[in-house]
Image (cartoon, grey):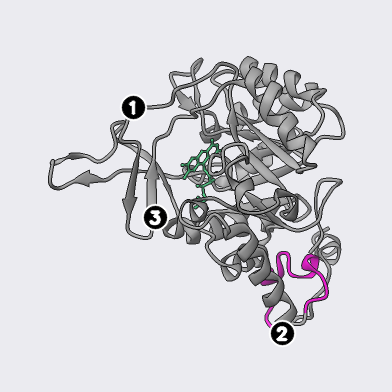
């Protein structure tokens, strides 16, 4: 079940999705966080943020809308309390960061670069760029690349920088490519596509913020499509796949599309054991299909039917 994010080894491919397990303390009541490949934190911001007004969550068919707005205590509290708590427990930690300007992302990366216990940094690019009329970074390849290049330039060389992409773009491959050209060591996808629902009793939008991010099984086919397209174009770039993973079978689907790590988000809200259960189900499923190692399944669906299971490096060679 071993997998790699750049040169960083993870004992297995399961992580939490950013924003769905805060900084891990609540989940730790249910299982030892060291049992999953990594814990991904909520997106850390420079200043503390109260988030958006309520209601900020709404259930939808096979999914959920949220407009939480990056609620959190800010980077100082994260570095003083949350990160040391995770480091003491030897939890492999992917720190997600969010900002409104390139300078803010860069300042966050500078604060994290020497902090002990950072396994990787995931750059949440689905934040409004306040220097570009609030246009979300992730919708613009050049703006995304600028953030990634700047974060990469200040981040310790041995900490992989992961660019988290949005599906709300006409061509996700071009944004992915721009991020890799900017220095991203890995990519993660998908962040929440924007959705909306209207309460037919009150006859008003269900969320105070009107629109919100859609997550859960409703978005899984979108996630599979994005991972598939990006893996086909950039087969040697590690991908963290996420979007509606509820079972080991769902995780396996993203792995077959090209993900080497799978994040579990919305499932955690009704099953705090979801990561451990999904890991066990995935292990059983791989064993039942005769895989000796996870790496042999990564991107397998791209090969013609009937082709033998081969290691990813074969795929890379054949794409040269
Ligand atoms: C309540 C909630 C909060 C989230 N907060 C963040 C966040 O802080 N940063 C981020 O990059 N993504 C955030 N996301 C997106 C998730 O990390 C994930 O990309 C998305 O929900 C798809 O996975 P899922 O369907 O398993 O939830 C959030 C999602 C939810 C549901």
What is the distance, in whole Å, between disc 3 and disc 2 at their CAs?
35 Å
Mark 2, residue position: 306
Prevailing SS of the magenta stretch: loop
The mark closer to the camera, 3 or 2, is 3
Q: Is residue 146 visible?
A: no
Label 2 SS: loop
Q: Residues within 10 Å of mark 1 (few under 14, many from 20)?
A: few
**Contact between labelled residues 2 and 3, with CB atoms less than 8 Å apart:** no
Instruction: Give the left or right position of residue 38, taking residue 136 as reference.
Output: right
- Snapshot quadrant of residue 216: bottom left
Q: Position of residue 255 (x, y in %)?
A: 67, 63
The structure residue drawn at horizontal position 29% and vertical position 37%, both measured from the top left corner, is 207
Q: Position of residue 233 (x, y in %)?
A: 68, 54
Give the quarter of the figure containing the N terminus.
Answer: bottom right
Label 3 SS: strand
- Examine the rendered structure and indicate whether residue 105 appears above or below residue 309: above
Mark 3 or mark 2: name the one nearer the start of the chain. 3
What is the distance, in whole Å, between disc 1 and disc 2 at their CAs?
53 Å
The mark closer to the camera, 1 or 3, is 1
Q: Position of residue 276 (x, y in %)?
A: 64, 61
Mark 3, residue position: 63
Label 1 SS: loop
Q: Is residue 179 visible?
A: yes
Residue nearer the viewer, 89 or 294: 89
Does the numbered disc 3 mark a residue whose Cβ is under 8 Å from ligand 1? yes
Residue nearer the viewer, 172 or 204: 204
- Snapshot quadrant of residue 183: top right
Residue 53 - label: 1
Span of residues in magenta: 291-305
């Amino acid at each position: 079940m071993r997998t790699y994010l750049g040169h960083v080894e993870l004992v297995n491919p399961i992580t939490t999705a950013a924003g769905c397990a805060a900084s891990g303390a609540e989940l730790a009541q249910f299982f030892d966080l060291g049992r999953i490949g990594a814990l991904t934190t909520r997106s850390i911001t420079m200043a503390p943020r109260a988030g958006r007004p309520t209601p900020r969550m709404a259930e939808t068919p096979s999914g959920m809308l949220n407009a939480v707005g990056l609620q959190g205590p800010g980077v100082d509290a994260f570095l003083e309390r949350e990160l040391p708590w995770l480091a003491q427990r030897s939890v492999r930690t992917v720190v997600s960061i969010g900002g409104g300007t390139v300078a803010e992302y860069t300042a966050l990366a500078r604060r994290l670069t020497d902090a002990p216990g950072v396994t990787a940094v995931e750059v949440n690019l689905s934040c409004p760029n306040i220097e570009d009329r609030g246009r979300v970074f992730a919708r613009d390849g050049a703006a995304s690349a600028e953030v990634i290049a700047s974060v990469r330039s200040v981040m310790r060389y041995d900490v992989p920088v992961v660019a988290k992409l949005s599906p709300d773009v006409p061509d996700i491959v071009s944004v992915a490519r721009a991020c890799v050209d900017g220095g991203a060591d890995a990519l993660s996808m998908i962040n929440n596509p924007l959705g909306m629902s209207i309460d037919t009793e009150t006859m008003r939008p269900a969320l105070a913020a009107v629109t919100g991010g859609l997550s859960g099984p409703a978005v899984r086919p979108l996630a599979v499509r994005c991972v598939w397209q990006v893996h086909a174009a950039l087969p040697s770039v590690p991908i963290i796949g996420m979007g509606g993973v509820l079972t080991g079978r769902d995780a396996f689907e993203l792995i077959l599309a090209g993900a080497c790590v799978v994040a579990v988000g919305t499932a955690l809200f009704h099953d705090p054991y979801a990561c451990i259960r999904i890991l066990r189900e995935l292990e059983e499923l791989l064993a039942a299909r005769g895989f000796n190692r996870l790496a042999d399944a990564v991107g397998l669906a791209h090969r013609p039917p009937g082709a033998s299971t081969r290691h990813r490096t074969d795929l890379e060679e054949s794409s040269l």
